[in-house]
Amino acid sequence: MSPYVSPPDVHFFNALVWEIVCKIPSGKVATYGQIAGLIAPPPDMDARSYLAFSPRWVGGAMAACPEGVPWQRVINAQGRISLRSGAERQRELLEYEGVHFDDRGRVDLHRYGWSGPD
DNA sequence: ATTATGACTCCCA
DNA sequence: GTGGGAGCCATAA
């Protein structure tokens, strides 16, 4: 599917985010910005022609995540959990998948970071 | 229309 | 490596 969206179809857009998140394998993590980057229009195209996108939106899509989507594999660019409520549960889910947290509660993105689709 | 608020990121001190 | 602040975009009030 083309990673570009023309109409301001929010629901479709969220679905696109979820679709990408579903591709993150167990034991790996991706950042909000990384997900956003997979959808953002290229620089030679008018960004206004597409539904504006930003890391914040990915967070919003995660908040409305349907069951079955591995939302726990999305963390912030610092390798930390951004979830305000339920952060402990997210950490448990990731550790269960083999993702290691250091003593300061951070994940080594060089080791566990998802290299993207394909 | 304006303001406040987010599961963010970047930049700089 | 860390923390604060600006920038960010959509939504809700």
Image: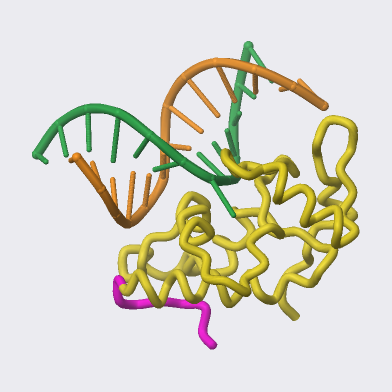
Chain colours: A yellow, B green, C orange
Query: Image check: A10 left or right of A15?
Result: left
The residue located at (41%, 70%) in the rendering is: A45
The quarter of the rendered structure image containing the N terminus of chain A is bottom right
Magenta run includes residue A40: no
Say which of A69 and A16 sits in front: A69
* Residue A74 position (above or below residue A101): below
Most common secondary structure along the magenta stretch: loop
Q: Could you say where residue A17 lies in the image, as x and y percent from the top left? A: 53, 69
The one of C12 and A2 positioned closer to us in this rendering: C12
Q: Is residue A80 left or right of residue A110?
A: left
Q: Position of residue B10 (x, y in %)?
A: 60, 40
Residue in view at x 62 percent, y 71 percent:
A69
Between A16 and A46, the one nearer to me in the picture? A16
Quarter occupied by the C terminus of chain A: bottom right
> Magenta region: which residues?
A1-8
Locate residue A38: give its quadrant: bottom right
For the point 80% across and 39% down, the residue is A106
In the rendered image of this protein, does residue B2 appear above or below residue A59?
Answer: above
x%, y% of residue A8? Answer: 30, 71
Q: How many marks?
A: 0
Q: Is residue A81 left or right of residue B1?
A: right
Residue A24, above or below A91: below
Residue A74, x across and y down, in percent: 66, 57
Q: Residue at x 62, y 74 (%)?
A: A68
